[in-house]
Every structure is written in structure tokens, then in C-alpha cells.
Image: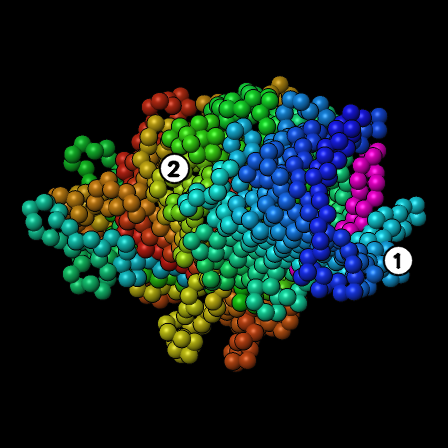
Amino acid sequence: MKFKYCVLVIMLSLVAQLHALELMNDEGLEKVTGQNGVSLSGELSFNEDGGPLTDTIDPDGVGSLTSTWGACSDAQASRCGARLSVKLNKDTGSQGWYVLDEMKGKISFEGLTIKSREITATDTFGGDENDIGSGMTVLEIGLPDKIKYENFSYNVATSSTARPTDVGFTQQVRYGVDFNGSVNMQGNMLVFPTGNP
Amino acid sequence: MNKNYVLSALLLSGFAQAELVGLNESSLEDVSGQTGIGINFDKIISIGSFTYSDDDGPSGGDLQFKDINIGNPADVTGTMAHSQHLIDVDATGGLFIDSLFEATRLQIGGISVGSHIGSRSFGQFIFDFEGTNLLQIGGATPSGFLINSTTSLKNADFIWSTNGASFHLDNLTIDRNLTDAVFEEKSIGPTQTALVIDITKYSSSTTVDGVCFSSADCGVGESFGSFSREINLINSQIQMHGGGREGEGLTMNMYFEFDESVNATGDGNVSSYTDEATIKLAKQSGNVTVTGFTFDIGRSEALIGDHVALQFDQVIGSYKVGSLEIAGASMGAFEMQFDFSDATHDTVLYQNKLLLAPGIAFAGEAFNTGNTNFDAFMTNFYSKVTSTSDGISLFNEWNMTADFIYTDDGNSLRVDNYLTYGNGYTTLDVRTGDLSIDSSNSTTESFLAVGVRDYKVNYKIDGLRVGSENSQLQNGYELLGFSPEAEFTMNAAIEIRAGGAVGNGITFDGDVLLSEANFALTKSNNVGVYLDDASYEFHFRDVTLDVDNQGIKLVLGELWSEFTVDDVRFGDKNSGSSLGGLIVKRYQTGSEVLINAGGATSKCMDGTGADAAACGTDGGYWLDTGTEGITIASKQILQKRVGSKENSATWITGRTVNDNGTPGITADDYYEANTGNQLKVDNIYTSDGYDDTNTHGIQTTFSVDVAKTRVLKKTTGVDVNGITGNKGDELISTGTGVADYVYVATPDAAQQANRPTSLVISSNTQIKELNAESIQLIHANALATPTTLIHGVKLQNLNLSSTLSVTPIR
């Protein structure tokens, strides 16, 4: 269960400087009567059966073929998920990469809403209203009621090279995450500008 | 007066070569019991000039056609063209003229207007044809003339030439039937009479074998492709009377209506374009009413000078394509309900008019668009021609409101209350290959040069309505990638060539600048998120368009662009709070786009199952997207930085505002250059995952459908339309109105059949490898020495699929 909250924290922290959370209330609902905006339902799936990298290669050029990337159903392939590598330190020959590795799975949701909204003097946001201010327009992202995860997984690792097919590749998986189940959500995320543009 | 003498003399000389012939026996069969005369007409006609004038002193001017020749196409001034004419009175007492034209050329050496006469023209025009025409003129009841005619032309060619190059419609066939048209003088108002033509029925069939840039026949691989059109009209009318918008001239009112009965079988009213495969606009229907169309010779427009002025008070109607097909597959139906009427916006009156002047008005000019980098491209484009070059210069202005309706498998999507207005200048001319803006192009390949100057465009929509015109207004256009409200000024230099990547097709090169722009990203409740003070400089080379069995294929050659936004505003589009500025640069080569008909594959949502039954058993619902729809597949190959061409994204904040000497007035404020701090994702590029090979890029398949989908209530209670339900209940439609629905805890099969209609967007994105060289922090005091925050980002092996149903917020 704690991993679900980890995801939420990561998602929300990406826009931490730009949003405040708001609980839904009837007053808020009244204000959207007859307005447009959009409600989204659907699903996202990552690498459910692998990605576009499927080649068998000769990594060191001496003739031994390795099937690094392949379909998830391919027992010969050592990996089928997506991989995001980030290098934080300047390359002096010893620094490695932080990696989100083997990302795959499916997320489905119902009722994610998006609309622009002008804040009025009567709106309250748990003490954050002063940061927004009456008359400010925000992008209101209404969180879906439920997010359902199916075999959603990834590893957090450190690696010597960005590509797993590079010469000298070594990797340490720090921890892995595997989601199955649902997360119930409530409230809105408000995105708005602050500071000097 | 001398011109009239010349004309009369030339016509007489032409008639002098005619000779009387005996009646053709087969024709006589159609006029039994009658007698008549037959004429063989061998002619070479040369007219020095022919001038139409509506100059009445304070307004008007001359429209001159010069060097008119009629003769045989082999040698229009040296060999006679032959025609036969049978003239008689048929059994009902009407005049009967049956004509046969052997190969004939009508050639015009130049058409010019007003003060341009003698210096530059619209170009030279040739029309070659052979064929027949049957014209019957009788008495109408109770008054007027009753006219029927049948025209059939074949082996026809139309050639427009300027600057030593030619645009050619090759091998046309033209068939026209006019049935029971009544011509009579009628009163159309308290003080106005007009020639009124009531058209009971009119049918037209046209084919063009090839379109190319050559005076010779279009060769294989040198043509746009072939075109055809079959149109049937009924119950139409044309009114014509003298007097233009200014003084003398011509005024017309018109009504045209498609004959929908022909759509019952086959393609009906249809237009098509064929390359390797065919794009077809089948089963066309609708009508149009044109009020107050005027034709005048105008004077002294600010940039194009004296001109032909075409203007109308209103054009209102509808146009529907019952089936838009690409390579045999149907995309669905499209309809447009439109109203072109004059209107005032921000104290400026926008009228619907088109002004045409001869020559290239901006030839040799040094441009000043406000973007010095782009000015060089425009100046170079117009440096290839001179003030005496032939061509067409246009000024057009418009104001239009419209609704657009797309219907996919019987489910409709309406783009509601589209409003657009604006004005601007365009030039058109045909040039030889050596005048290209791209030195790598063939010097022997002529092309159409299209220049656009200060084209000010404004548009906005209210939103989308899915299901019916009474449905609740919603967003969703953001996911389709278009802005709901925009304004910009466009300058552009574009070259269009015949021939595609494979065989026939179209090739484009061009430079486009959208400046002084404002784009809405999203809006609701009259507020939104806007990209303000934006500029989009866009260049493309060797872009080809072909149609084959896969669909419409664009091979994008080389693209590079820079999109700058001064402010990302929340609230008002010009004064809302700003998130800062953006600069997005793109550089691609070898990218492709493929557009085809047919949307996403039907699938199980929120569950697993190969069909509706299995899906329902698993707790999901079956999303049936039908057979129609739109699918766009693209491959974007992002290249590493080359010179100033790169892929990067920069966010700028903390800039210094210059109040421009008027403190308190923000309208003319601007940000000081080289102030603010930047966060830049630098040198983004794709590769194939192992080395620098770069052929895969970002491959995306994007499908758009309109289909019935499941919508669950988000919270217990009354929704925005006053309908009560519990959290998790399913919305079931009971009608087409905004509040015509109920919430049902467990809908049965009949209720599930009435699920609401929604926009369904399906996509799949595949990336082998996407790289960013670095993410940098750039301080205003150290622009040349950025601080690197991230020393490299690499995304590999991504295969991301999504299916989203888009509905209103209830």
C-alpha cells in the first residue's frame, strides 16, 4: 500500500510549486453548471508485451550474440520494459546513471476532469487560498475517483552505463515495485502561475 | 474606338472564311420535318485587345484582354480551326443549333487591369478543346426563353503561363447538361429588374488526366495526379443585373442546390483525386445562397493597386460529404453549415471580398516582418521576380461563422460555433526551376510560387458537442492538438511542385512565420490558458504528399522550426498571470505522416475479453469503435544539433519588464532581452538504441472515433444538470438534450445500448531511444556558461498505449 502513496507523492511533487489540493464540495460543483471542460476515462499501458527494441546483438564484437531486448513473452530476452536513465554528475569516468528500469503495466481510470476556473473570494483551499488569490485563473485537474493498476511495475537502480547493451554494463537494483489493485482518490489539483514571469 | 474597328474587321475576316454546307443527315433525323442551314466555319481569329470598362468617372476602370487568338492548336495564328454548325427550328418551334468543333485553341496573351495595363498581367492563357454542343432555345411558359443545352468537350487542355513557366491541366473531358432553364427579365425588387435564370436541372462531369508544370503533356511522375468531379444541381437560380458595388459593374444573386437523389446509388455527387490510390468525396449534398455578389474594377488598393473586385453581402448554406474515402476506406461523413456575412470586430469591419491584381505586387521588396531571420527568406523569395513579372496578386478579407459536423458510424461530433475573420495578401505565379528558394531543387522543374504577406487570421470555437447539436458543450480539442481560439499574422513563401516521393503526387518547399500570435491551449468559462505574444517560424524542404493504398502519405524531408512564447497566461489571453516564457526548437529529417480512414480497433475497457460477452463477464465494457474513423500514424526522427538547428525546450522566468515609457499602461510593455533565468532541455534527439543510427524515431499511431462509451457517476448526489444518482452509477441517455439522461446502478442490455456518445482517442507511441544531452540552468548574467543540472537523459524501449473517452463534466 505504501507504494501507492509513493506514486502519488512523486506525481504531485512534480508540480509542487504550482498547485494546491482542494476538496470537492457542493459549492464548487454549482460553479461548473453548464460549463465546458472535459472528463476523461480510459487506460494507459506501458510495454505490456515489450517495446520496439527487440534486436539480438553482439555487444563486444567477438561473436557471442545476446538477446537483451525482446517481447515479455520471449524467454530469451533479458528485458522488455521501458528504461529511463538520468545522469546527475559530470562524466569523469566514474559516475553512473540513476535508472527507472523495466517499467511496464496498465493503469485505468474514470472521471479525470480538466478545465480552467476563475477563483472567487468565497473559495477556500485548506489555507492555500492566499497563494492563489481571488480572480486568479487556475487549471483545475479533478482527480479520478479510482485508479486501477494491473501488473504495473518498475525497478529503481543505479547503473554504470545508460544502455544495458553498452560495453561494461553493470547495474544494481535498489528496489522494485509491483502494483496490482486500486487507489481511491478525491479532490482537485489546481495549477497556477506564481512569482515573476 | 480603334479597338472596335479592329475587332469588327477581325471578326469579319474570320466569318469570311466560313462556307455554307449541306445538312448533316444524322442531325436531320432529330429535326424531322424541318429544314435549316449548315455552316462549315474555318477560322483564324486574331484580336489585338478587348477591353471591358465600368469606368464612370469617380469609380471603375478597365479590364483588358490582349492578343486574343483563335485557331488550330498546332499553329494558332497560321492554321485554321474547323467547326460545323447546323441551325434549324425543331418540331416545337424552338431554335436548334448543333455544333461540332474540331481541335481549336483559344489563346489570350495577357489580362490586365487599370494602371497595370502595359506593364504586367495575370499571365498568358490557352484553352484547347474539341467536341460538340447542342443548344435549343424555345419559348417558356408564361414568358421568357426555355433553354436546354448539352456540351461535350474532350482532349481539352488549360495552360496558365507566367515568367516562362506553365501550369497545365492536361487532357480534360467536360460534359454539361442544362435542362429546362428559363431566361427572362423579372422584377426582383421595388425598383430593380434582372435577368433571372431558373435552372430546373444541371449536371456536370469533369475529368482531368494530369496536372503539371509544363506546356507539354504531363509525363508519368511529373503530375499531381488526376481529378474528376460529377455534380448534379436542381431548382437553382441566378439573378443578374447591371451596377456594381461602386457605380457601374455587375451584381448577381444566386441559389444552388445539390440534387441529392443521385446519391441513392453509387458515389452520387462526387469529387475525387487519384494518385496511386484515390481520395473520394462522395455523396455530396447541400445548398448555398449567394446574395449581393458584385463584380467591379477597383482602384488603388494600398498594396496591389488597381484590381478586379469580387465581393458579396452574404453566402449562407450547408455542404455535406456523405462519405469521405481514402484508398477505398471510409472516414465517415463531414458537414459544414456556414454563413459568410460582414461583421465588425474590435471596431474593424470585415467584409467578404476578393481583390485580384495582375503581377506580383511584392516583387523585389525587402521584407520587415519583425523577425530579421525570417525576413531574409521572404526577401529572397520575392527577389526572384520583378515589378513587370506576370502573376496574380490577391487581397482577401472574410468573416464567417460555421458549425462543422463529423459523423463516424452514425455518431456525430460537432465543432460548435466556429468564428473566423481576417484579411491578407497572397501572390501566385509559376516560375522556372532556377528561381527556387532551395538550390538543391532541379533547375528544370517549374513550380507554383505562393507568397503570403501579413495574413491576419482570427478564429475561435465554443467547444465540442458530441452526439447531437443539443448535447452539453465540452472540451476535448486539446487532445486532438488544435487550439480553440487563436489569432496570428502569417507570412510565407511556398513552392509547390508536381510529382511525389513515388510517381505522381505533390512536393512542397517553404518558409512560414506566424507572428503576433496568441493561441489558447484550453479554455472554459471564458477563461483559459493561453500562449501569448507567440511566434512560430517554420521551414520545410522536400516535403512530399502521395496517396497510395496505405492512405495519404507525407514524407517530411527536412523540417526545422522555432516556437517562442513570451507568456503562458492563465485567465485573460492578453493580461492573465504568466507562468513565464517558452522556446521550443525542432529539427527533423526523414519524418513521415500517414493519414488513413478507419479508427481504432474495438476493445475491452476496464477488463479483459476478446468480445463484448467475454468483456462483460470480466467486469469490463466493450468499446465498439465501428469501421469508420480517422487514424494518423507519424514517425518523427529528431536529429542532433546542426548549427542553429536543434531540438530543445526552454522555460524562462524572472525577466525584467520594460514599461516602454508609459508606466501604468501594460499594453506596450515588453521583456528586456537577455534577462530572466532559463531551464533548458538541450539537444534532444532520437536514435535506434545501440549507436547513432537514427531511423526509428518516435512512432505514434493516433486514432479518433466517435462511439458510445461507459460513463460512471463520480460522486453521490445531484450533478451539474440536476440529475440525481449514486457514485458509481452508469449514465444512460434518454434523449439528445443536455439533461436527457438518468443514472442506473446496474443497466440492462437495452439500457447499455443507450450509453452516451463520446469522443474516443486511442494512441500508441513507440520509442527505441530518446535522448537529451543535458538539462541546463542558464542565468541572465552567464548566458554563455550554463550550469548543467542533468548531464544526460536517455529513455529506451517505450511502448505506450492509451485509450481515452472524452465526455463533458457533469
x and y percentages locating residue B56 in the rendered image: 84, 29
x and y percentages locating residue B286 in the rendered image: 68, 59
Residue B143 is tagged as: 1
User: Residue at 39% of width from left, 64% of height from top?
Assistant: A148
State which region is magenta.
Answer: B232-257
Eye-nearest disc, 2 or 1: 1
Name the residue beneath numbered marker 2.
B558
Q: Secondary structure at mark 2?
A: strand
Q: Nearer the viewer, residue A105 or B726?
A: A105
Residue A139 against residue B392 in the figure, above or below: below
Assess whether residue B733 is covered by the magenta stretch: no
Quadrant containing the N terminus of chain B is top right
Give left or right: position of B637 versus A94: right
| Residue B349, image quadrant | top right
Q: Nearer the viewer, residue B99 or B490?
A: B99
Q: Callout 2: 10 Å neighbours few (<14), some, many (20+)?
A: some
Give the overall secondary structure of the magenta segment: strand
x and y percentages locating residue A114 in the rendered image: 52, 53
Picture mark count: 2
Give left or right: position of A160 versus B279: left
Quadrant containing the C terminus of chain B is bottom right
Q: Are marks 2 and 1 in contact (CB under 8 Å)?
A: no
Residue at the limit of the structure toward the right, as seen here: B190
Question: Does residue B721 appear in this view?
Answer: no
